[in-house]
């Protein structure tokens, strides 16, 4: 009897010991399960905010481009797209390539198409934007005729011709020499005789680097097919800027940007989230409402781009460079070197002096905000603090919070100074 009772106690002790040992594993399992559920929920929220992201990321699951494994990627010519949006400082960034003697630079080549196809929404035009870019990178400018109407296509019509170093320099025009560094004066270039685009195509093929600056690609996913093309060797430089500064600059130029803002918002008109932005309650300031609404969509597109790059394969990351406007204007020489290294271009003392002088001008802007000119870098960065109301700052920080966090922009504390 005592022996049987002794065995029961032993079994009870063993069972209790086993339970004690299992408790940490059970708790750990529940903790990990909660983390997995939280991660999945966070991923679903990101995909909900960027509804097209999942489809675009699926492209990375395709077979890796043959040129990466076979070593056959075209290295004889580099094509670069400056991926930006309105009022981020993209014209200044583009000018750094316009000045380089080895670069064939195209300024806003898709502008004519957007004007010709208005009021088409920005989303429906993305395929046409990509196709045009594909042709332009191959020095085929005949695609421009599709959107020129009855106008004759010549060098006095396209690619920001009045400030374009290639168009205004020898051999197309005697006004300038390509290797001389300095802004092209529009009134001087305007005296150049128009040249046929076939002459421009022949000149295009001579350059080892071609750069297109435009603001009409809504998100990076549009360019994935071109990035996978081994014959293009396409590289992307994406420019970001503090959303509050972008919003301030967009409001300053709101009348010039209202049509593009409506086109951007129409691209998401089926979404309940953006539908409200197309019906502003305040009819008095409709232009401001459209421009502000488009800013919300721009931040969502930026977030989508960053998530896409984070999940991209190594071959894409090697051909992608992210740059902040604030870094560019506060540290112009070092950022210029970084840009040129990425593009396999060499710098020079003249180019270094040029970029420095462009950030040491007088004042924030001129009466013509789209004119490229020297600016006071610090005033350009911090102007939004003086010009935006507390309510406007709060709105931008609310719907651009994730983007600001990813890019390192601190939210404004009214009692502390802002740090870019």
Image (cartoon, grey):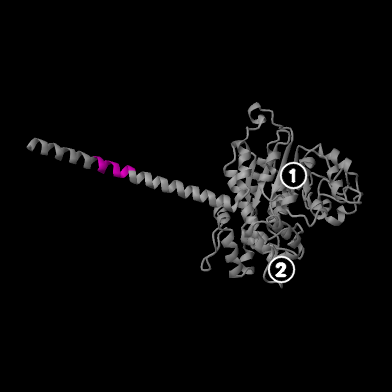
Closer to the camera, 408 or 129? Answer: 129
The answer to whether residue 104 of the structure is visible from this angle is no
The answer to whether residue 217 of the structure is visible from this angle is yes
Helix, strand or loop under label 2 = helix
**Which residues make up the magenta segment?**
18-25
How many other residues sit within 10 Å of disc 1, few (<14), some (14-19) or many (≥20)?
some
Residue drawn where x is 67% and y is 56% of the image:
270
User: For the N terminus, which image quadrant?
Assistant: top left
Closer to the camera, 110 or 321? Answer: 110
Closer to the camera, 28 or 209? Answer: 28
Identify the residue position indicated by label 1 in the image: 130
Residue drawn where x is 65% and y is 32% of the image:
65
User: For the C terminus, which image quadrant?
Assistant: bottom right
* Image side of residue 180 versus residue 332, left or right: right
Identify the residue position indicated by label 2 in the image: 286
Residue 337, given in percent of the width and then of the height, sits at 65, 44
């Amino acid at each position: 009897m005592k022996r049987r009772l002794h065995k029961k106690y032993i079994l009870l002790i063993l069972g209790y010991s086993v339970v004690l040992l299992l408790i940490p594993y059970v708790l750990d399992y529940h903790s990990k399960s909660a983390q997995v559920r939280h991660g999945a929920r966070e991923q679903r929220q990101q995909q909900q905010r960027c509804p097209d992201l999942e489809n675009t990321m699926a492209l990375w699951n395709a077979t890796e481009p043959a040129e990466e494994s076979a070593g056959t990627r075209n290295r004889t010519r580099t094509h670069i797209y400056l991926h930006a949006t309105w009022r981020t400082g993209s014209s200044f960034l583009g000018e750094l390539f316009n000045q380089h003697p080895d670069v064939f630079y195209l300024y806003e080549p898709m502008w004519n198409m957007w004007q010709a196809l208005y009021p088409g929404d920005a989303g429906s035009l993305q395929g046409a934007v990509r196709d045009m870019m594909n042709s332009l990178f191959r020095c085929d400018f005949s695609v421009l005729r599709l959107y020129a109407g009855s106008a004759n296509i010549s060098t006095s019509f396209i690619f920001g011709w009045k400030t374009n170093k290639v168009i205004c320099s020898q051999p197309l025009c005697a006004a300038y020499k390509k290797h001389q560094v300095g802004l092209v004066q529009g009134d001087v270039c305007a005296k150049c005789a128009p040249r046929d685009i076939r002459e421009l195509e022949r000149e295009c093929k001579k350059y080892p680097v071609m750069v297109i600056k435009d603001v009409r690609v809504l998100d990076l996913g549009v360019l994935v097919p071109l990035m996978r093309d081994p014959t293009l060797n396409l590289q992307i430089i994406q420019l970001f800027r503090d959303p509050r500064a972008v919003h301030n600059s967009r409001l300053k130029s709101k009348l010039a940007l209202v049509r593009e803002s409506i086109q951007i918002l129409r691209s998401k008109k089926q979404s309940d989230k953006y539908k409200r932005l197309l019906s502003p309650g305040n009819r008095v300031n409709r232009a401001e409402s459209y421009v502000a609404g488009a800013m919300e969509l721009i931040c969502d597109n930026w977030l989508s781009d960053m998530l896409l790059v984070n999940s991209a394969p190594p071959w894409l990351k090697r051909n992608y460079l992210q740059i902040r406007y604030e870094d560019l204007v506060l540290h112009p020489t070092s950022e210029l070197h970084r840009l040129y290294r990425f593009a396999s271009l060499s710098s020079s003392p003249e180019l270094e002096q040029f970029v420095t002088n462009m950030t040491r001008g007088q004042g924030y802007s001129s009466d013509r905000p789209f004119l490229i000119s020297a600016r006071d870098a610090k005033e350009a960065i911090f102007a939004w603090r003086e010009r935006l109301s507390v309510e406007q700052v709060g709105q931008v920080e609310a719907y651009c919070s994730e983007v600001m966090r990813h890019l390192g922009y601190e939210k404004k504390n009214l009692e502390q100074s802002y740090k870019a």
